[in-house]
Image: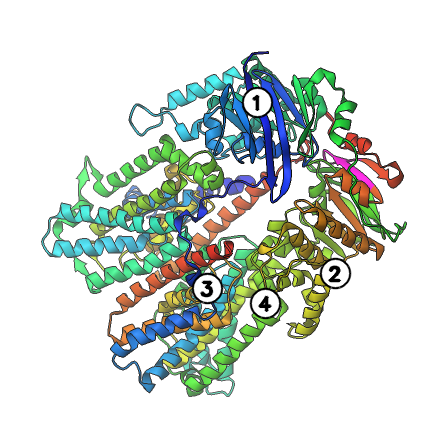
Amino acid sequence: MNALLRYASPILFVVVIATFGVLSPKFMTADNALNILVQSAPVGIVTIGMTFVLLTASVDLSVGAIMFLAAGIAGKMLQADMSLSVALGTMLVIGVASGGINAAFIARLRIAPFVVTLAFLFIGRGVALTITQTRAMNLPEGFLRLGSARIGGVPLPLLIFGMMLLIAHATLTRTPFGRQLYALGHNPVTARKAGLNTSLLLASVFLISGFCAALGAILSLAQLGAVSPKFGEAYEFKAIAAAVLGGASLFGGRGTVLPGTLLGVVLIQSVEAGLVILNADPYLYPIITAAIIFIAVLIDSGRNTLLERLNRRRIRNDSAQA
Amino acid sequence: MPSSRPTKETAGLILPGPLFRRALGSDYFVLGLCMIYTLAVGPFTPGFFTPENAANLLSTALPLLLVALGQMIVLITGGIDLSVTSIIGLCSVTGAMVMNPESGGLGGDMLTVPAGCIAMLLVGMLVGIANGFAVSRCRMPAFIVTLATMMGVGGFAVWLTQSKAINQLPSAFNALGGHTIIALAITVLIALCVHMLLGRSVFGRWLYATGHNPRTAHISGVPVGGVLIAAYACSGVLAAVASVFYTGQAETGSPVLGQRILLDVIGAVVIGGTSLSGGRGKVLWTIFGVLFLKLIDNTLNLLSLSIFTLTIVKGAVILLAAVLDALRIRVAGHPA
Amino acid sequence: MNAMPAIEFSGISKSFAGVRVLRGISFKLGAGRTLGLVGENGAGKSTLMNILGGNLLPDTGLMVLGGTPYTPQGPTDAARAGVAFIHQELNLFANLSIAENLFLSALPRLGSLPWIDRKALHDRTATLLGQVGLAIAPDTLVEQLSAGERQLVEIVRALALEARLIILDEPTTSLSVRETETLFSLLRRLQARGIALIYISHLLEHVRELCHDLVILRDGEVVAQGSIETYDTPAIISAMVGRSLTRLYPERRGTSTTAPLLEVRSLTQVHIVRDISFTVHRGEVLGIFGLMGAGRSELARILFGLDTAQHGEVRMGDRVINRGEGPRERMVRGLAFLTEDRRHEGLCLEASIADNLALVSLRQHARTPLRLLDRNTWQRAISTVRAAVRLTEKVSDAQSVQTLSGGNQQKVILGKWLLAKPEVLILDEPTRGVDVGARFELYQLILDLADRGAGVLMISSEIEELTGLCDRILVMSQGEIRGNFPRAEFSREHLLAAALPREAHA
C-alpha cells in the first residue's frame, strides 16, 4: 500500500501511455511525443509556479485569470502598435504584480489562500474582459513566430519550458530559498522557530506563480495567435492536477519540478492528446480532467493520512514488528 | 503550563476601535450596510425605487438565498462547497429531461412535475453526499473536492445536453418557479426550517460543534463524518431547490443556468458574517448578506455597468468579507 | 572545575497567573560539566529550562552565561549565545536532508551566487557527524532515520550552532538500548570537548551514569544539590517526594465494591502499551500514576476508542467492547473521557458555556421524529449541572468558554460528562493548571460520582492527589503496569520508585 502510494504518479503515467498506445497506433510515435511536449510548454510553466505554491501548503486559483489579464493588456498594446518586446515585458510585470496582490492578502493579512486567489480569479477576469470588451483579438505575425521558431532545431517553446524546468529545479534543490520553502511547507511553526522569514517565503511563491502564469500566457498565445475571451480558463485546474499528479502535496512540503512537474504535465497533456487522437467527444474533456484531479488528490490525501499514522510518537521501544 | 511569549500573529491587522468592534459583532451590521448603501446609491440609480424593481430584486434574491443557506451550513462545519453552481446546472438539465415530453416519456401525466422535482432534488442530494463522503471519509480538502465536482458535474451536464437548452417544460412547473409568491412561500418555509434546524435540533448543535472543533466533537460522541456528509447533502438539496426556481423562471433546462452565481453565494454568506473557519453562522446573517449582494447587483445593473464590472465588484466584496472575517476572529480572541 | 561557571542562576522566580512556579532558584554549572536535573512533573524543570532557552522571561533573578549576564529575549537570542534546547518533540524537517536541517537558516553559498555550496555543506556536515562518531551520509533525508538517529541529529545541530550549553529533555524515551548507548557515547565526546550539558530525565540510572552534578527541584525550589556521588537512588527519590503537603481532600462517603464495571485484559499495542490488565469496580476510584510519557494517556485513548490496540479485550459489565467501536458507541455503553488537552479536545473554545455543557447529552432532549430540542428540559439540565459543578464566576450561559479560568473550563467539561450519566469516567490529568479552590471542588465532584456507584479511572502525575482520593493506585511506566497499590499500602516513595523507568528492557 505504502509503495503503491509512493510511486502512484509513475505507475499512472505508464498506465496512461500504455492504454493510449494500445488504443491508437498513432499515439506512440516520435512526432506525437514531440507534439505533446511542445503543447505541454504553456501549462507546464504555469504548473512550475503552482508547484512552488503547493510546496508551502497554499494554492493559487488565480493563474488562469492572471494569464488572461496579461494577455488582454498585451493584446491592446499590440493593437496600438507598440513593440512586441514592450508588450511581452508588460505581461511579465503584470504577472508579478498580480502575484504581489495575492501575496499581500495572504502573507500580510493572513487570509486563506484559496479565498484570496478565488476572488482574484473573478476580479482578474472581470478586469480583462472589460479591457478587451470581450472581443477576440488577433495578434501580429511576430507573436506567432515565437511559437514556431526553432533554435538549433529545438522549438522555442520547448526550449523555454526546458530552461524554466532547469531553473526551477535548481532553485528548489540548490538554493537556500528553495530548501527553506520545503521547510516552511513541512511545518510553518518550526520554520519560524528555526529563524526563517516565513511571511517573505510565502509571499515570494505567489510572485513566482504570477510570473510563471504570465510566461505561460506568452507561450500559449504564441501557439494560438489570438486572445479569446475564454483564454486561460480552467488553467488553474490543469496546473493543480498536473502538480499533484507529479507528486506535489496539497498539504505542503512535498513535490519536485524534475521529474515531478514534468511528469504530471506530460501525463495531463497525453490524456488530452490521446483523447483527440481517439476522436473522443470534446464534451467529455472536463469530466475526465475532473476525474484526474479527483484521483490525484485522493492519492495525495491517502499518502498524507498514512504518513501521519507512521509518525506517531512512541512510548516504548518494542522489537520491530509489522 | 509554560506558555510561550505572545506571538505576533496580529501584526498583519490592526485591531479596530471599540465602537467598530461592537458594530462588527452585531447581528444587524450588514443590514446597516445595506441601508447605508441604499440611501447612498439608490437616489442616483434610475428605476431603483420602483415596484417592478422591488419585485425583480425579490424574485432573483429567493433562489440565491436558498443556495446561500446551503453554503452557510457547509461553512459552519469549516468546509466550503464550490460545486453548487454545477449542481444547479445538472439538476436543471435532469429535471428538464424528465419533464420534457420527448425525452421524459411521461407525456402529460399528472405526475410529470412531481417526478421532475424529485429527480432534481435527488440529483442534488447525491452530488452533495459524494462531496461529503470525499471530505469526511477520504479526508480530502473541501475546496479542491468541490472544485473537481464543479468541473466534473458541470461537464457532465453539458455533455448530457450536448450544450443545448431543453424547452417545452410543463406550465405547472414554470409557474412553480416563476411565480414570486409561490417561490417566496417555499423559500420562507425553508429558511424557517434551516433556522430551526440550526438553533433547535441536535443536528444543528452537532454542525456548530464540528465546525468549532472536530476533535472535541468526535470525543464528545458527535458522528463527525455523518454530520459532514449531511451538511454537503443539505447544500446539494438546497441548490436543487434553487434550480427548480431558476429553471422555472427561465422556462428551460440549461446546464449553465447557475454558472454566474458562485461569487454571489460565497460573497453573500461570508459578508453576512458566517466564518470561513467554521463554527459561526446564522440564517438571519445570510438573509442580510444576500440582500447586500443583491442590492449591489441590482444597482450596478440599473446603472448599466457591464457584467464584468459586476464580477470585479463582487470579487472585491469577497475579499472585503474575508478581511472582515479575519477581523471578527481577532476581535473574539481579544475581548475588550 | 574551571573558575568560570558555564551558567549560573541566581534567584530566578516565575509565576503564572498568580501561581508561583519557581521560587528563587540558584545554582551553577561548571564549564564542561554535566548536570542532572530531576524532579516530579510540575516541579518546575520545564519552566526553568524554558527561561534558559529564551522561551520565557523570568519575573526576577539573574542568569550569567560564561561570565557575562544573559538575558535572552527569544529562542534566537539563546541560540546566538550558544544555548541549545533539545525538546522531546524534535524540531527537524523530515523532508530535508541532515545537512540541510543542520544549516537551514544559514546555508553556505557559492561566493555571492544564490546557489548552495553543496560541497562545503556536505563537508561541514560530514566533519560534524565525524566529530560525534556518527556514520550517516549527510545527504540522508531525516525521514529515513530512526527515532534515535533523529535525536543525534538534533544534538549535532546544536553543535553546528556552536552551542556551549546543551539542554536535553528526556532524550532516551523512544530510543532502543543500542541507540541509547550511541547517544551516551556522543554525549561523552561532548563532555570531553568542554561543552556543558543539562540532562533532564526520570531515568535515574542514566542520570547517575552520565552526570557529575545533581539538582533536585520540588514545588519550584531547589531541595538538594551537589555532586552526584553524594546521593544514592533512595535519597534522590525521598528528596523528590519530600514531606507530604497538608492539603485537604473531601471526605469519601461511599466505599468501593467488588462488582466489576470495566475490565481490561492484556491490552497491547506495539510501541505504545504492553499487556495491560486491570478492573475498575463499581464505586471505586482507581488511580493511574505515572510520569509523563509512561503511556497513561495513550491507554486512556485506547479505552475510549480514539486509538486502536492490536491485542486484548475491554469489557463493560458483561459485554465485550468491539475493537472497532468509536467514542460514540463507547459513550452509549456508559464510558466518559475527560482528556488531558482541555483546549483542543475538551472544549469548543469559541462556543458558549451552554453549548459546551449540552454537547454530549443532546439526544436526551431530542423530541422525535424531527429531533428538535426541548428547550425546557435542556435549559433545566444546564442550570442543574451548572449549579452542581458550582460554576463560580458570574457568567451567562451564552458567554464563550474561552473567557473562563482553567478551573471553570474544567468544571464545564466535567459537567458535560456528568450530564451523560456515565458508568465509568476516565479522567486524564483533570487538575492540571487548576487553582487550589477549584481543585477541591473537582475532587468533590469526582468522589460524588463514585459514591453514586460509578467507577472512576483517574490518571495523574501528582502522587499527592492520587493518594488523597483513590481507593487503589496502579503505577504505569514505559507502557506497562508496574505496580498495584491498595489504599493501605500507599507510600509516596514506593509509588515513585515503581514509576521511574527502568534501564534496558532488552
Front residue (pair B227, C475)? C475
Read off the residue under disc 1: C8
Read off the residue under disc 3: B22
Q: Is residue C41 left or right of residue C253?
A: left
Q: Quadrant of residue A212?
A: top left
Name the amino acid, label 4: Gly
Q: Nearer the viewer, mark 4 or mark 3?
A: 3
SS of the residue under disc 2:
helix
Q: Is residue C127 left or right of residue A170?
A: right
Q: Dot 2 falls on which chain?
A: C
Q: Dot 4 falls on which chain?
A: B
Stretch of the chain drawn in magenta: C473-482
Q: Dot 3 falls on which chain?
A: B
Read off the residue under disc 4: B204
Are circles 3 and 1 on residues that touch, CB within 8 Å? no
Residue C418 vs A12, above or below: the answer is below
The numbered mark at residue C217 is none
Q: Is residue A319 left or right of residue B174?
A: right
Are circles 2 and 3 on residues that touch, CB within 8 Å? no
Alpha-carbon span between mark 3 and mark 1: 50 Å
Task: Judge whether residue B40 is colored magenta.
Answer: no
Res. A20 in view: no
* Majority secondary structure of magenta residues: strand
The numbered mark at residue C388 is 2
Q: Dot 1 falls on which chain?
A: C
